Image (cartoon, rainbow, N blue to C red):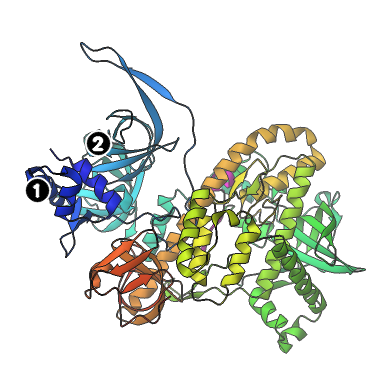
Amino acid sequence: MITEEKIIELLEKYERLSKKELKKLMLKGDKDYVPVEETLKKLKRDRVLLKDKLGRYYLAGKSAESMFGGKKLGRTSEIAAEGKKTGKHERKVSSKGKRKARSREIEGKIALIKNKYAFFEGEGGERLYIPAEKLMGAMLNDRVTAVKTGGKESDRGAITSVLERANQTVVGTIENKNGDIFLVPDDYRLNVKIKLDKKEGLPENFKAVAEIYQYSQDGGEPLGRITEILGEGEQPGAEMLSVLRAHNIPDVFDQSVIDEAEKIPEFISSAEIADREDLRGESIFTIDGIDAKDLDDAVSIKMQGEDYILGVHIADVSHYVRPDSALDAEALKRGTSVYFPGSVIPMLPKRLSNGICSLNPNADRLALSCVMQIGPEGEVISYRIFKSVIRSCERLVYEDINKLLEGDEELKRRYSHIYDELILMQKLSGILGKRRRAAGSIDFNAPEPEFTLDEEGKAIDVRVHERGVSNMMIEEFMLACNQTVARHMRTNNLPAVYRIHEKPEKSKVENFVSFIRGYGYNIKAKNLNEPKDYARLLDSLKGKPEERVISRLMLRTMQKAKYSQENTGHFGLAAQDYLHFTSPIRRYPDLIVHRMIHFSLEKPAALGVWAKRMPAVALRTSERERAAQEAEWEGDDIKKAEYMLNHIGEKFDGVISGMCSTAFWVELDNTVEGMVPLSSLRDDFYIFDQERYVLTGRNTGARFKLGQSVRIKVTGASIRGRSVSFELAGKKKNKL
């Protein structure tokens, strides 16, 4: 009998196969084709398989996994590797009349789940196919134990226990199906509906949160109850709330946190200033985005002979957020502020983030200052890190300073009192940037969206966020400061949370090299070993049609940066020492570094205790950073879909940014990305080459490849689905 598992395995490997091809691969000369027919019919009836117009079978929802680790190549971000090896466990299995056998249990997670099967990924790299009846009610991302069921070399398995539930609460849309009420999860990967308690008044098509109280053991629906109604579906407000709930991001503060914040005085006392260096007479100012309210960094500059004296003055948040206070616990819980189009979910209450701690102009503020003496070649000759009190003389915005540095006469007059300092800063940032790039630092300039919202918060425009001279100037100063403080922490043996970035995995580099050969770049993987190797390749791409796609894939080849108590260096920045120091209002790792500096000056005995806490802090903040990133991307996608709803039927130019066996994605100049289903291409049947990422027409030989320019028409947009759909409009503009 031909098993469902065997057919699924073959289609996982070959993507699409006809019935005849399946018979050849499976039966190898056997004349009895009835089992094949019956199994295919069953799988198609169960919607596990679909059939294309040429009669070839493929897995429903199947898309080729990116050779760079992602679902598709549309995102510029890396997918973080998950799992760690925690040990091996064995248990005895016995049956009547047989001697006891030993079957090794493997710890891991459910990595993919479909109607009739799932895949398990072990912490040691094992990958097992799990039939639905062997799942024991496990769901996506659940931590589980599994055993192999078909012998030592088998890739079949069964779940033996669920260690940790990843989906105790689920966000989705309430639906009524034949009198039964379900919550359909927003995360389609869960591949299951939550059957709800029958309660009167549950509003259909509303967004809600459900708590699962009973997990199915036999492949049926889990049972749940509604804990929160978020609002009517497809409404942006409800959809944004659903993003927060899905990523466990709280949008309100507990009363204990608010009460603690309210007790903090708005004004600085003389006692608080007594042991600080008074810089209120110095020319210090902030430069931020026009909408920024949490101003946590200010800068100053002057010359000392040929050397630059650069001051980076950071809000002293740790003075107010004390260890193990309610504020501290909440900040660690959140890990970071989350930025959505037109709104911020702050790490700290606004009384602190926008008020007491924010370096607002003409207000006395407590700070930690890092003042660096920088030579004419950009080297940090010496530095001081100390407690200070400052008074920002100006609240500058990037847009104005960019214009000023480009020669705007009116702005020159307006800021004449600090004009010379801004020119010095421009010159120094150029020197620092040149030195950093010479060391091998990799500059990824991935486009980011910028939204214009109307009074109701609806997206009426989306464009690429422009980074001007002043943006890059402040970035260079923050990088220099972060590296200097990191070196200070290392050389003084102070506990810290470092920002680390490991070398790319060998397999990903090899895949990347294999891909770019299709564009004429004959580079060997062994020649992409150091940061400067990648930097040189990026430089060689500038101005070329393939620049965007190759730089994006290079980014995806990189490891994901994360926080660690161990200082292992930052590959992308080509830096031995790096951490985050400059944004304690919105990032907990920065706050912790500030706290350790305070302890080194005031309570050295406390450092040992806190050193033991650093691994947990690093792990927690890395997790929350990831959740925040994913939530922000999802929020952007909602606004992009909302914007494109007003442009259905319109035509745009774009670039192919990703592809799989059933579709390709096109990114427009404004960063909006949409899917073109291959079923909409009626001129030919297109075959996907996963090695080269090329779609080729079987009859015409027409090709689509990553980075290729195309013209599309917008056919749909879904706020609920966070997606936009396209179809081709006319001929391809060019071939790469």
Number of marks present in the image shown: 2
Tell which residue pokes out farthest to the front in this image: 29
Number of residues whose C-alpha sits closer than 10 Å to that of mark 1, classed few (under 14), some (14–19) or many (20 or more): few
For residue 180, say whether it is visible.
Answer: no
Residue identifier under label 2: 216
Please identify the quarter of the rendering in which residue 704 is found: bottom left
Residue 47 location (% of width, % of height) = 18, 52
- Name the residue rendered at 6%, 44% in the picture: 34
Residue 629 location (% of width, % of height) = 50, 56
Determine which of the numbered discs, if any, sits on residue 281 in the image. none
Q: Reading the chain from its start, which is encountered first: label 2 or label 1?
A: 1
* Helix, strand or loop status at disc 1: helix
Query: Is residue 605 one of those drawn in magenta?
Result: no
| Image: magenta residue range | 331-346
Residue 380 vs residue 537, the one in the foreground:
537
Q: Amino acid at mark 2?
A: Ser
Q: Disc 2, disc 1: CB below 8 Å?
A: no
Please identify the quarter of the rendering in which residue 298 is found: bottom right
Residue identifier under label 1: 37
Question: The C terminus lies in which quarter of the figure?
Answer: bottom left
